[in-house]
Amino acid sequence: MKFTLSWLKDHLETEATLPKIVETLTDIGLEVEAVEDPAKDLHNFIIAAVLEAEPHPNADRLRVCRVDIGDGKPVQVVCGAPNARAGMKSVFSPPGTYIPGKKITLGKGVIRGVESDGMLCSGAELGLSEDHDGILDLPADAPVGQPYAVYAGLDDPVIDINLLPNRPDAMGVAGIARDLAAANLGALKTPRIAPITGVFDASVEARIDLPSEKAALCPVFALRLVRNVRNGPSPEWLQKRLKAIGLRPINALVDITNFLAFDRARPLHVFDADKISGAIAVRLAKAGESLVALDGKTYPLAETMVVIADDNGVESLAGIMGGAASGCDENTKNVLIESALWDPVNIARSGRALGINTDARYRFERGIDPAFTLPGLDLATALVQEFCGGEPSKTIIKGEVPQHDTYIQFPWSEVTRLTGVELDPSTMAGILENLGFALSVSPGNSNLVLVRAPSFRPDIEGKADIVEEIIRVAGLDKVASQPLPAEGAPLASPVLTLAQKRARAAKRSLAANGLVEAVTWSFIDKTQAGLFGGGGTSTTLANPISADLSAMRPSLLPGLLAAAKRNRARGFADIALFEVGQIFLGDGEKDQKTAATGIRQGLAQEKHWSASAKPVDAFLAKGDAMALLTALGVSLGGLQIVPGGADIWHPGRSATLQFGPKNIIGTFGELNPRLLAALDMEGPVVGFEIRLDALPLPKAKPTKAKSKLDLSDFMPLRRDFAFVVDRQVKAADLVKAVQGAERALLADVDVFDVYEGKGIADDKKSVGITVVLQPREKTLTEAEIEAIASKIVTEVGKKTGAVLRA
């Protein structure tokens, strides 16, 4: 919500400074987001008088002017404007001034051999108009030496407040002034609205054609015809105000409706009465109907949308936007002013469905003051007569203005009970009355008062709302800070959940492993989501920000790959990125998961003379995934690594991580070249994705003390085994069989070689395994070692069919 300081002072008589007004607005809950200075580029421009304007000695179209800038020391300016002459007053900019219209900083110059110490400016050079044919020609009484921005009224600050949805009364400047007056920042002076007496009966038939069960969609519909108007540009003061808040002046009739939407939070609409055919009715749209709106776009209408129509069809989307066919222009002679009340929920749904955001919709969907429906029509009529002339008709009213009767029994002690602040009842009563509440003291009980909420405050429903109104105006700084009791209080439970702890630990681990954290969009292109197993109806957005952000991501990989692609395009060849965030597998309660994902592309480490640089591979991604699981405290004893994964992974260079067939925790490996081709990326790219939600829960520990360090006094010994086994047997199965053969002394098992070729049958392979034995109580004898080795060979043969290689 934007408004200017002078606009506010039309409703509030105050001597408060701008900083004080801004501070008070924030204190009472109308948080100021920004204060704009529209004259920030015009502060150095001053009014000057041209004393002399002589022809330039070396140029026919230039003049050498002596200019009085108000300090008693005339300066010399070379000017090429055809209207430059002695005796006129214009705008002068000294050297060092930034010229907004030309986007340059002015310096001293020599033009055709004559020194020029500044410039006389046109409206285009000041950025105020398109006129660059001559310098500004000011009235004779313009004060020499005064800043031009002050003289022209261009220094009016624009205040932008962050409007909360429960404050529809603050959608108008008058409502904001009311709050400031209640906060003792001045006196409210919003003028009362005089009723307009119509001089004739309008020859317009109006009706509300809504089913009885839909009557709440339009409780009241009011019209007034003003005939013989002269539509043209609105007054300069009104155009300035609209421009200051970012609106484009159109014509007087339209500008009046825009002005009242911001001045009194009362949206209205004007129809060219001569373009209306037959009766004008409020009804639901019919199947197949559409509206060519004032923005030039055609909108298909649904049967749930409320419209204003005549015999020709739909003329306006009620409460949102009017139609182009009945819009007012410079030829309008008879205007029909509409003031109505619309259902906020229906307005919000219709506007959202069509993607239309207007100032009218913004206000109607938050709740308009019903009691201001007819006074708003009178005020609009008065402004039309003032700016355009004309004769008003009697008001046409269909339906009834709903009565807003919210009465609350309120004890003054409730303020102290809820806030701890003690205020005098007279102070609290004054605040409420200044905010528009009506009070009736209960007989025989000075602590109890009957409060009637004003019609412009639909958010007031109970006693707590009244306490809020009192305390925000009295000052939240009056609420004393009190420490929580410490003695005897139980210790607080841990603040972070297991999921939060794991997410934080994952980020620290991956960053320590050399990957850089990225934060990508939760929305991706629907087609791209389909490549990663998503893109279904349940995860497609009904109203996306853009076509490229139309579906919820089923994986973190699309965002990371897009980031890698952008970085490669900018010359960063070696990529290592990770992200920890949410993925969306559906719209069910448990379909939102947390994943930790990383990708690498290019070289595994920087090029250096001391070591050869190796490209990334699936084993590097495996190392990242295993390091992450270890950092999260996940026991890897039961982890299974199953070759292959989803279609996005390379079928021969990827694997699935799981604890049994039903508990899949993630995948690692090289991404499928077909996927990279679809994304227009070069390969190879390796990566991993671990679903943190699927990880086993940590085992409960009876104590937080670390276990005792157990180091054996005896040297470990290593034995290598070469097993010949069928090709389809997994090396992991061999390792698992070795681990099961000797649990007491076995310290480590590792695969060091896989061989297929000469000397090995075509359907066989040789797998070399190193076994580390760690004695605990004594040095093992040769016989004991051979017994363990024999046990290992027997167990591996039994579980996998492998035999020792000859």
Image (cartoon, helix red, strand yellow):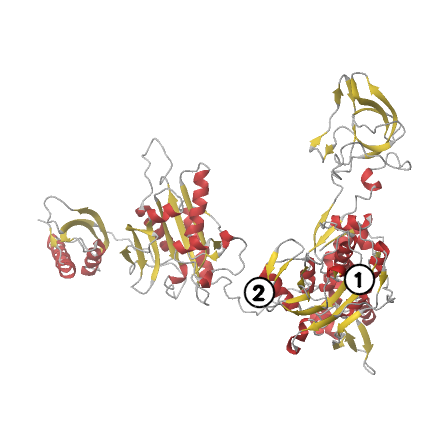
Q: Mark 1: few, some, or many residues within 10 Å (few <14, many ≥20)? A: many
Question: Which dot marks residue 178?
Answer: 1
* Residue 739 visible in image: yes
Q: In the picture, residue 317 is in which quadrant?
A: bottom right
Q: Residue furthest right?
A: 141
Q: Nearer the viewer, residue 262 or 687?
A: 262
Image spot of residue 106 (x, y percent): 73, 28
Left of 647 or right of it: where is 171?
Answer: right
Query: Left of 361 or right of it: where is 744?
Result: left
> What x and y, as percent, mark residue 416?
73, 71
Left or right: residue 357 versus residue 710 is right
Q: Is residue 442 left or right of residue 654?
A: right
The residue under label 1 is which amino acid type?
Answer: Arg
Residue 164 shows up from this direction? no
Residue ID for mark 2:
288
Q: Which residue occupies the foreground of this view, 361 or 539?
A: 361
Which of pointers 1 and 2 lies earlier in the amino acid sequence?
1
Residue 499 vertical placement versus 561 (above, below) = below
